[in-house]
């Protein structure tokens, strides 16, 4: 299949929307990461998303609508607390899970009685949904298990020849996927940390729970949690310790005959010497680190390194989302004891 790359503009938006209406898939930018969208009401269209990504059928998809008022068309009654979250955080990098009323294709929810809904803020995402005049089921537009795409180039690297159309709207802003909150129980649960932090959510509705690691739950609430995620081609190790310890680890791998790539921020990076390096930004600017994280994980795919070593960050605020992704991408953590 030929993959068309369109720069987002009014005429190309119409073309992309036509693909959606013809039950095809289109990759498009959102403020978090690029999504791979298709008509959420069509079983045939949704099947093409799973096929293009190689995504397991039991991992449900997020439905994207263009304004919060649309959420009620796909859900049962919206609880008061859920409505408060919707009013506060949508549109934005926030996804809410509610009881489904069965209007989206059953494969979108992977057989669950719930549906995940998001209202993206990105103007191109908004325009595509409105022009197609359909709700879009859309996972991140990467091959299943790989880091999410934050540029149209990332999408092209993964899905060239597997999808008909990529709508290029430049680099995404947040760089990590939306915060996913399950609002079907009495206390809302954060299933995936993201750009909207736990603190910001608690400021609106009081205490919320954060899902523990998969090991803590016999049956994962979010089916996607049991699969590999965000994996670069070389094994990734997270280094917890100061610069001298980090440098020792680099040398340790080099002595074992490995070429070492390093992901770190300044000023730490200036104290390290490795074979390849990707600077994620300034240590005290976690927004910048989040925005660059997936580009970093993909950067080493084009370099011949045998192992990647990454800095760790305090798991608070945006740091919680960054560490969640790094932990999932990593083979292990190496701690200074
Ligand atoms: O920022 C984002 O959320 C991006 C952009 C494209 O919107 N999308 C995204 O989708 O990250 P995806 O498919 O890569 O991740 C969706 C996550 C998965 O972990 C999935 O298991 C979970 O949301 N999920 C979807 N529907 C669910 C449901 N009904 N119940 C529990 N978890 C659900
Ligand atoms: Mg994904």
Image (cartoon, rainbow, N blue to C red):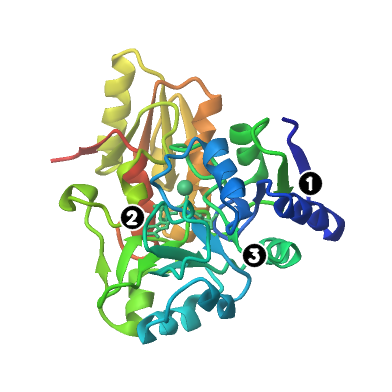
Q: Nearer the viewer, residue 276 or 131?
A: 131
Residue positioned most to the top: 257
Q: Which residue is mark 2?
A: 222
Q: Residues within 10 Å of mark 1 (few under 14, many from 20)?
A: some
Q: Is residue 178 left or right of residue 7?
A: left
**Image coordinates for residue 243, horizontal then vertical, percent:** 30, 40
Q: Is residue 46 left or right of residue 160?
A: left
The kind of secondary structure element at disc 1 is strand
Residue drawn at x 49%, y 58% as measured from the top left: 62
Q: Which residue is mark 1?
A: 6
Badge nearest the viewer, 3 or 2: 2
Badge nearest the viewer, 2 or 1: 2
Q: Nearer the viewer, residue 56 or 175?
A: 56
Q: Is residue 228 left or right of residue 160?
A: left
Q: Which residue is mark 3?
A: 122
**Image coordinates for residue 205, horizontal then vertical, percent:** 33, 83
Residue drawn at x 51%, y 78% as measured from the top left: 72
Q: Earlier in the sequence, mark 2 or mark 1?
A: 1
Q: Earlier in the sequence, mark 3 or mark 1?
A: 1
């Amino acid at each position: 299949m030929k993959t068309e790359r369109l720069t987002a503009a009014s005429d190309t938006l119409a073309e992309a929307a036509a693909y959606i209406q013809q039950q095809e898939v289109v990759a498009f930018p959102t403020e978090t990461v690029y999504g791979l969208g298709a008509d959420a009401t069509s079983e045939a269209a949704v099947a093409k998303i799973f096929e293009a990504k190689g995504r397991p059928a039991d991992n449900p998809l997020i439905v994207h609508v263009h304004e919060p008022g649309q959420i009620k068309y796909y859900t049962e009654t919206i609880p008061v607390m859920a409505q408060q979250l919707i009013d506060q955080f949508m549109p934005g990098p926030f996804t809410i899970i509610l009881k489904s009323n069965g209007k989206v294709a059953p494969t979108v929810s992977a057989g669950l009685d719930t549906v995940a809904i998001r209202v993206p803020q990105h103007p191109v995402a908004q325009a595509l949904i409105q022009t197609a005049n359909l709700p879009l089921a859309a996972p991140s537009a990467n091959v299943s298990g790989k880091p999410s795409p934050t540029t149209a180039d990332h999408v092209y690297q993964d899905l060239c020849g597997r999808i008909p159309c990529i709508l290029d709207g430049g680099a995404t802003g947040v760089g990590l996927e939306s915060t996913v909150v399950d609002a079907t129980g009495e206390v809302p649960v954060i299933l995936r940390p993201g750009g909207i932090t736990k603190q910001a959510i608690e400021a609106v509705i009081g205490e919320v729970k954060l899902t523990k690691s998969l090991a803590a739950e016999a049956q994962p609430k979010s089916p996607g949690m049991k699969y590999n995620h965000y994996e670069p081609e070389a094994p990734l190790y997270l280094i917890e310790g100061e610069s001298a310890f980090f440098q020792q680890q680099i040398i340790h791998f080099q002595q074992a005959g490995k070429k070492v790539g390093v992901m770190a921020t300044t000023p730490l990076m200036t104290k390290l010497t490795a074979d390849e390096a990707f600077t994620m930004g300034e240590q005290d600017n976690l927004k910048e680190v989040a925005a660059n994280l997936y580009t970093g994980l993909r950067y080493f795919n084009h370099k011949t390194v045998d192992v990647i070593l990454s800095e760790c960050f305090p798991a608070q605020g945006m740091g919680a989302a960054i560490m969640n992704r790094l932990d999932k991408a990593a083979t292990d953590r190496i701690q200074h004891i």
